[in-house]
Image: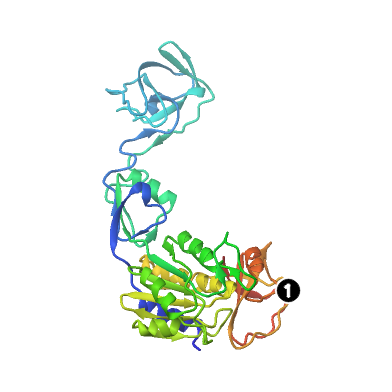
Amino acid sequence: MISVEAALGHLFNLVAPLETEHVSLLNAGGRVLASPVTASRDQPPFAASAMDGYAARAADAFSGATLHVVGEAAAGHAFEGPVGAGQAVRIFTGAPVPEGADTILLQEDVDAAGTRITITDRHRAENWIRPAAGDFRAGSQIAAPRRLSSADVALLAAMNVPEVPVHRAPDVALIATGDELVMPGDTPGPDQIIASNSFGLATLLRDLGATPRLLPIARDSKAALNTVLDLAEGADLIVTIGGASVGDHDLVGAVAAERGLERSFYKVAMRPGKPLMAGRMGETVLVGLPGNPVSAMVCGHVFLAPVIRRLQGLKAAPMPRSTAPLAVSLEKNGPREHYMRATLNAGHLSPDPRQDSSLLSVLGQANALLIRPPHDPARTAGTPVDYLPI
């Protein structure tokens, strides 16, 4: 067995960032920027009013002054001409500030009568002007790599960037294996269960920005597994679920080896998830996950998530951990790194007392994986521990 850290290192050696493609701004959210993007204009491109009111000269902006309104400026419609001494221009939020004006009088701070305004004693000396290029300048960049958020997309639009270079979304083929499985909605036999892992992993992968392909269940024969593996052609990553152990019906390793798999590792010193396998099969990376539902999902968070991020051009690194104090005391840990299903509540971590790797209901209630290092000593309540948010 190898450590979780060593297994991640092997996986990162198997994958590299995928090629770049250009997508429209509307489809850029959640994708990973592949190269820096540069603004083609200043924002705002002109000094703009931050409020509704009157544009005037600061020298004329004092309580009791009366100004002559010579025109109007609205968003998208500038006032043509300068503002002179004793003059003002009716202005609305977002409109260009006219030449000669260097302050905005708030409309609630003046008394208006026809084409005249009188500044009241409510006026305070603030100019309410957004300077040109106050947000960003032409030539400003968004650095890469970066997963594009909704705020990033809004910024790119303001930068006048209609398309962005992103890494291609990873194509991931998911293959559940085993005679005991039937699809949700089917009627299982007396000795069968519902395939759940592939659906949970597909959702996880989709949330990470990958494109999962759920292939048919591979029955426990070499012919069936080969048929489904043929359907995975063209995938960047093949993920098998179950069949990676050493039982008589665990065929993934043998069939993959016959298809040219160069195995990188097998078995990881972790709980749950020990029977994990990975390697390269031609141009495709294959990861064989254990079949127990919780084991497969935990391995998805610990291994598949950072691999997908690497394929998208992000740093080759484990998923970020956080730290919180224990809500209860824990006994010492064994020789394998343990990922305990836990709940973070009021800033404290509470591991569920049931840690069996078949209990999806426990995983469904958890929002964290509490991480116990190998041979971790007993811990008392209040001790800070690492956890992986899920």
10 Å crowding of disc 1: few (<14), some (14-19), many (20+): some
Give coordinates of residue 366: x percent, y percent: 64, 66
Residue positioned 43% across, 49% down in the render: 151
The image shows residue 4, relative to residue 209, as above or below, that is below
Give coordinates of residue 321: x percent, y percent: 54, 70
Give coordinates of residue 204: x percent, y percent: 50, 63
Relative placement, left or right, of 213 versus 200 is: left
Give the number of callouts: 1
Can you see residue 315?
A: no
Q: Which residue is mark 1?
A: 328
Q: Residue furthest top?
A: 114
Q: Secondary structure at mark 1?
A: loop
Relative placement, left or right, of 174 versus 34 is: right
The image shows residue 109, relative to residue 300, as above or below, that is above
Looking at the rendered image, the quarter that the C terminus falls into is: bottom right
Q: Quadrant of residue 188?
A: bottom right
Q: Quadrant of residue 387?
A: bottom right
Q: Nearer the viewer, residue 207 or 32?
A: 207
Q: Which colour scheme appears in the figure?
A: rainbow
Can you see residue 51?
A: yes
Q: Nearer the viewer, residue 226 or 372?
A: 226
The image shows residue 217, relative to residue 271, as above or below, that is above
**What's the residue type where badge 1 is placed?**
Val
Residue positioned 31% across, 26% down in the render: 78
Give coordinates of residue 380: x percent, y percent: 72, 78
Residue positioned 36% across, 72% down in the render: 230
Q: Nearer the viewer, residue 101 or 145?
A: 145
